[in-house]
Each structure stands twice: as C-alpha cells, then as structure tokens.
Image (spheres, helix red, strand yellow):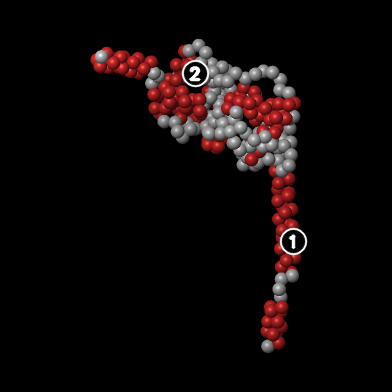
Amino acid sequence: MKARLSTTFAAATWLWLATAPPAAAQDAAAYFHQNCAACHTIGNGRLTGPDLKDVATRRDRAWLARFVAAPQRVIDGGDAYAARLVEEARGVIMPALPTLTPALIEALLDFIEAESRQGPSQSAGAQVGTRPFTPADVAAGAAIFTGRQRLANRGPSCVSCHTVRGVGGLGGGQLAPDLTRVFERLGGRQGLTAWLGAPATPTMRSVFATRALAQVEIAPLVAYFEQSARQGGQDNRAGLTAFVVLGFGFAAAGLVVMDSAWKHRFRSVRRALVERAKRS
C-alpha cells in the first residue's frame, strides 16, 4: 500500500513538473503584464509602442536586447530604426527600467517569441469598446479626475498631480504632466485604456501598485480625455498663470499686513532711550 502511494505521489509530482511553465517564463510573463502591457500588445496591434508579435523577425535578438536594456542610448547612437520607432510613437521614448537584468531580458524575448507562435495571445491586450462616448461618460470621467468621485481602490485623484485644459479653479496639479492631449499622445482609445490599466511610469506604478483603477473607472476617464483633446488648443496654462498671479497677490497682501503691524509696534521704551541718547 505504501509503495503504491509513493508511486502515485511520484507520478503526480513528475506530471506537475512536466506541465508547469518554467519559473523564468512565469517571471517574464508577470513582468510583461506589469511593465510592458501599458504600451505593447503581442498580436493585437500597436498601442503607444509597436505590436511585439514576431518582433524577432524585424530585428535580430542582439539588437532587441540592447534596445530593451537602454532605449535612449540606442536612439542617441543614431540608429535609424530606433528613430523611426520614436516617430511612430509620437515622440514617446520607451523608459529604461532599472529592474531589468540581462537574464530577464532574455526571458522576456523568449516569452514574446512563444506568445507570437500562439493563436490568440494572452498578451493581446484588453478589448476596447468602439461605441461613441456619451456626455454622461464625460461627466463621470470629470468627476473621477477632479476627485468628486472617490476611486474604488482609494487611490489619489488625478487632479492631485495633473491638470487638463478647462478643469477650472487653479487649474489642477502641476507636479506631473498636463493631460490635455494625452488621448492623442498615447494613440487614442486603445492605447490610453491599456496605459490606465497598467501605468508604466515609476511614479504611477508606485502609487497605483496596490490601488489600481477599476475597469468601470477607466472608460469614463478615457471619455473625459478624449473630450479634452477634441476641444483643441494648447495644454492648460491658465491655471498656472492664475496660481502665479494669486501667489504674488497673497504675498503682497501679507507684506502690507506685516508692515502695518510693524508701524504699530510698541515704541515707548525705544523712544525714551533714543531721546535720552540725543540729550547726552
């Protein structure tokens, strides 16, 4: 009986080991979805960056490894293909990720090749609806952006760090990029949807790693950003101007108040001492 149980356990263990994906492949898949899927798909068309399906047929593996490790260095080196990628991405340059190691880069390239050989890839990206957004969608997105509607996972509101044209008040936050034309910069509805689902910048990753946007919050935000881009015009400068003008105004008012207080300071002891010094 014991021998039969041991044989069964050994067979089950062997079967699990034989069918389980290698640890490197699992790490590469997780890394791709956390860091790359905001800008790339494997088989579902371009987002901000190119579709990576069969990317190994466009450039050799050594070039791909160099570019993934240090995109800016390859671009600065005058590589024509890298320059074309930047142009097609509307000037957006792929960031260098400090967590990438040579071994992980090789595992990522293996993962992309394996996914490219499959039919429907699990990394094809989210399917984005094509229905026109309604005024209600835009209004809901504005409420989420400005913080009037709290995020489901308790993340900070967008306006804490970002602004858009026409947001009102003092124009929103100035710590992060102006999002007036982000819909265009990230390639439209699909690219922006993917980016909001898995933000790729270090700051956004750290903020939303445990407070990701819910799917029901992403579509209204996309609607709001699409409306902002369609209104035309440049990025929001009115808010910054109002902030500077009000800042100078409050500073001047503060100086006037302090000057007035200083004029009415207690003088009796000082005046007596000065008069006594003049007489002596």
Secondary element under disc 2, as helix, strand or loop, is: helix
Q: Where's residue 232, x and y in %?
A: 73, 30
Tell me: residue 74, above or below residue 2: below
Instruction: Kindly identify the amino acid type of the residue bearing the numbered disc 1.
Output: Val
Q: Can residue 90 be seen here?
A: no
* Disc ID at residue 234: none
- Which quadrant of the figure contains the C terminus? bottom right
Q: Where's residue 169, x and y in %?
A: 73, 42
Residue matched to label 1: 256
* Dot 2 crowding, Cα within 10 Å, few <14, some 14–19, many 20+: some
**Residue, x 41% and y 30% (percent of image)?**
101
**Residue, x 47% and y 31% (percent of image)?**
70
Secondary element under disc 1, as helix, strand or loop, is: helix
Q: Is residue 160 left or right of residue 69?
A: right
Residue matched to label 2: 55
Looking at the image, which is closer to me, 244 or 263?
263
Q: Can residue 133 be seen here?
A: yes
Look at discs 2 and 1 and give the one toward the viewer: 1
- Which quadrant of the figure contains the N terminus? top left
Tell me: residue 273, above or below residue 246: below
**Residue, x 71% and y 43% (percent of image)?**
170
Instruction: Kindly identify the amino acid type of the residue bearing the numbered disc 2.
Output: Val
Q: Where's residue 108, x and y in %?
A: 44, 23
Q: Where's residue 201, x and y in %?
A: 55, 33
Q: Are marks 2 and 1 in contact (CB under 8 Å)?
A: no
